[in-house]
Image (cartoon, rainbow, N blue to C red):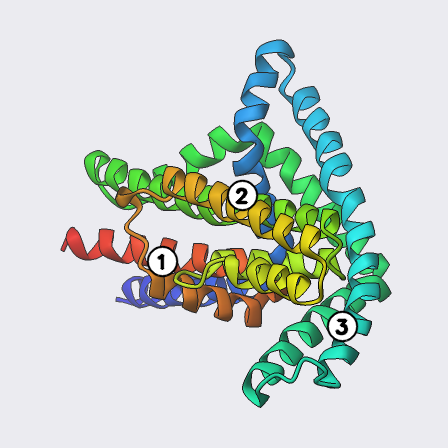
Amino acid sequence: MKNNTFKKYSKYLFIGIFLIITLLAFLVVKSFVTSILTSIVLAYLFYPWYRKLTNLIKNRSIAALIMVIFLIIIIIIPTFFIINSLVKESLPLYTYIRSNQLNLTPEIQNALNKIVQYILNEASNLAFTIPKFLLHAFVTLFLFFYFLRDGERLVQDIKSLIPLNERQKEHVVNEFKNVTYAIVYGLILVGLIIGGLATLGFYIFKISNPILWGLITILVSVLPGIGNWIVWFPAGVIKIIQGDLFNGIGLLIYGFIFISGVEAILKPRFIGKKSKIHPALIVLGVFGGIQLLGFIGLFFGPLILVIFITFLKSILSER
């Protein structure tokens, strides 16, 4: 009798200790949630290149290290220059919008004020917390290395923990692959490409604050039903009204072909019907993600919500 009582309470004690340790583990990594998510997405994006590299370099650690160096060159270093430019560009634009020299309606002016002020605050915070930024960059690169090198084994370990039979596991994994591919490539990669093309166009056709407007273009390209034309089209029209026909018409043509045109080609390729991503999830994910994780939540918010819905549907379908 005493043995049974002891076993019963020891089970509850074990569950209690496990929950406490789980909470402590979360508190330990809480500050680095953004770094963890970033490293996972970066590993997912660069994994095809890593696989090709391992065909040439058999040592997986060396191949992963080369990818880390490549990532530092194309992302980490340019980020410093982008942050510095954002701070410089946001201040005069924020002052200009607040003066309402464009004679905007109060609603539009208020919305633009909030967007630019948010970008200014985020950029300033990053600029003035360089040690923190470097720490997060180090954690991201460190995890990126191991997710590349040990990613396949890690996926198999996670798959083995799913409490379903093999057929059900394959269904869940395939659904997860579809939505992750659609979000990572259809929203994140396409959004960054469109933002880069827009920034280049704004710079070529002499639009003030090209990096800032490029960042806003990324935001509107992620949101369904809006379209990036809402940024480049008014900019081109304003140039024409100001008498700068060459840059105004040039930007309109450039925007139609190289911004909206490229987006129209790329997005359907990555976000197909099989992904079944509802626009409402993207909108909620974007704004909720920004509030929770900052600017990077623009991409991770939709990804988290879509993955949650995918798991929920899989669990309910097996009941």
Residue at the spot of label 1: 308
Secondary element at tag 2: helix
Q: What is the distance, in whole Å, between disc 2 and disc 3 at their CAs?
A: 27 Å
Q: Residues within 10 Å of mark 2 (few under 14, many from 20)?
A: some
x 43%, y 48%: residue: 183
Secondary element at tag 1: helix
Residue at the spot of label 2: 189
User: What's under tag 3, amino acid-wise?
Assistant: Leu
- First in residue order: circle 3 vs circle 1: 3
Depth check: give the residue in front, 275 or 221.
221
Seen as rendered, the residue at the extreme left is: 319
Depth check: give the residue in front, 318 or 290.
290
105 vs 272: above or below: below
89 vs 42: above or below: below
Give x and y (percent) for residue 233: 56, 60
x 19%, y 57%: residue: 316
Nearer to us: label 3 or label 1:
3
Depth check: give the residue in front, 318 or 13.
318
User: What's under tag 1, amino acid-wise?
Assistant: Phe
Give x and y (percent) for residue 227: 46, 59
Label ID, residue 93? 3
Q: Which of the 4 image quadrants contains residue 111?
A: bottom right
CB of mark 2 within 8 Å of CB of mark 3?
no
Q: Is residue 223 visible?
A: yes
User: What's under tag 2, amino acid-wise?
Assistant: Leu
Q: Which of the 4 image quadrants contains residue 39?
A: top right
Label ID, residue 262? none
